[in-house]
Image (cartoon, rainbow, N blue to C red):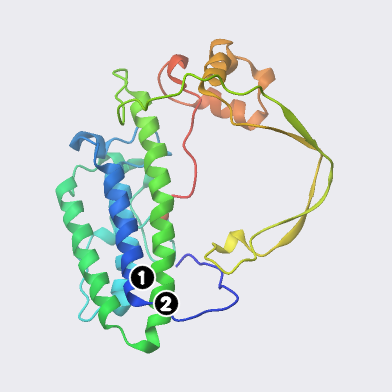
Amino acid sequence: MPSAAQPKTSSVPNRDAVWQRYREARAETERLAAPLATEDYVVQAMPDVSPPKWHLAHVTWFFEHFIAAPYARGFAPFHPEYGYLFNSYYETIGPFFPRLSRGLLSRPTVEEVYRYRAHVDRVIGDVIDTVGEGAWGEVARRIELGVHHEQQHQELLLTDLKFNFAFNPLKPAYQAPVERSSAAARALGWTDFDAGIRLIGYDGREFAFDNERPRHRVFLEPFRLANRLVTSGEYLAFIDDEGYSRPDLWLSEGWKTVRSAAGPPRSTGSGATASGGR
Ligand SMILES: [Fe+2]
């Protein structure tokens, strides 16, 4: 299973608190998916995105495989093929369905995926209620990892939806436009940073993935950092200024992506790609 770095100290987590945290993360995923039409759940507009339906099932499989299977009483998988369909790329667990073809699956249906989620939620709730004290610490650690994994996929869900919708000439919107302030963005400024050795990596006591630890030294070349985020207006100005047609503005890897990205004409931002662990 994917690993989380061990906190420096550990105490036995409260079962009610763990259940509450689990339920909140699971509910947030479904809240994010609520604006979707059924057809939206199946689209995979390019190889690096996954259909929303796959995200919802994959995070569920994670809890089923890593917690329910080893710890639930009388465990039986919800469906014998779901491990193959919804394992992402954990080679040690077994073969998995080709990532590029996730959008070709009309089954299981969206409704079945939601039933799968509800079923695994019930099983995890039972595990939390009944697992022995000797195993509880490890179960709680795995649930914490699963919650963070699901939260990662919440980000991926939105990133992928953004690409899927942008690909569609009808320009569907995920939600109604948010009321925006008409105030202009503050003036762009830059802060210079000297080269030198810096400390990066987490050394706190809260959850962190293994690749976020340990605290360690890195050498940084001198760099400049803007005092605010890029605005949508600046991003559009870059596109209108033929930013996606000028190799002099890109490093080679980025330019390669721009040139190879499949999708609609540049007016919809065809250079964008989804990224992240899937
Ligand atoms: Fe994942």
Q: Where is residue 38 drawn, in percent x and y? A: 18, 37
Name the quarter where the N terminus is drawn: bottom left
Q: Where is residue 202 drawn, in percent x and y? A: 63, 61
Whether residues under marks 2 and 1 lie with C-beta atoms below 8 angstroms apart, the answer is yes
Q: Where is residue 274 drawn, in percent x and y? A: 46, 37
Q: Is residue 7 above or below residue 157?
A: below
Q: Nearer the viewer, residue 108 or 10?
A: 10
* Disc 1 target residue: 18
The answer to whether residue 57 shows anywhere in this view is: yes
Residue located at (48% from left, 26% from top): 261
Image position of 237 (left or right of 143): right
Query: Which label number is shown at residue 4?
Result: none
Rounded to the nearest whole Å, what is the CA distance between mark 2 and mark 1? 7 Å
* Ligand 1: image quarter: bottom left
Q: Residue 190 appears in which quarter of the rendering?
A: top right
Q: Residues within 10 Å of mark 2 (few under 14, many from 20)?
A: few
Q: Where is residue 53 drawn, in percent x and y? A: 27, 45
Q: Residue furthest top?
A: 241
| Number of residue marks | 2
Q: Residue 227 appears in which quarter of the rendering?
A: top right
Three-letter residue code for mark 2: Pro
Residue located at (57% from left, 78% from top): 9
Is disc 1 placed on a helix, strand or loop?
A: helix
Q: Residues within 10 Å of mark 1 (few under 14, many from 20)?
A: some
Q: Nearer the viewer, residue 200 or 112?
A: 200
Q: Earlier in the sequence, mark 2 or mark 1?
A: 2
Three-letter residue code for mark 1: Val
Image position of 268 (left or right of 28): right
Q: Nearer the viewer, residue 226 or 42?
A: 226
Query: Which label number is shown at residue 13?
Result: 2
The answer to whether residue 86 shows anywhere in this view is: no
Residue located at (52% from left, 67% from top): 4
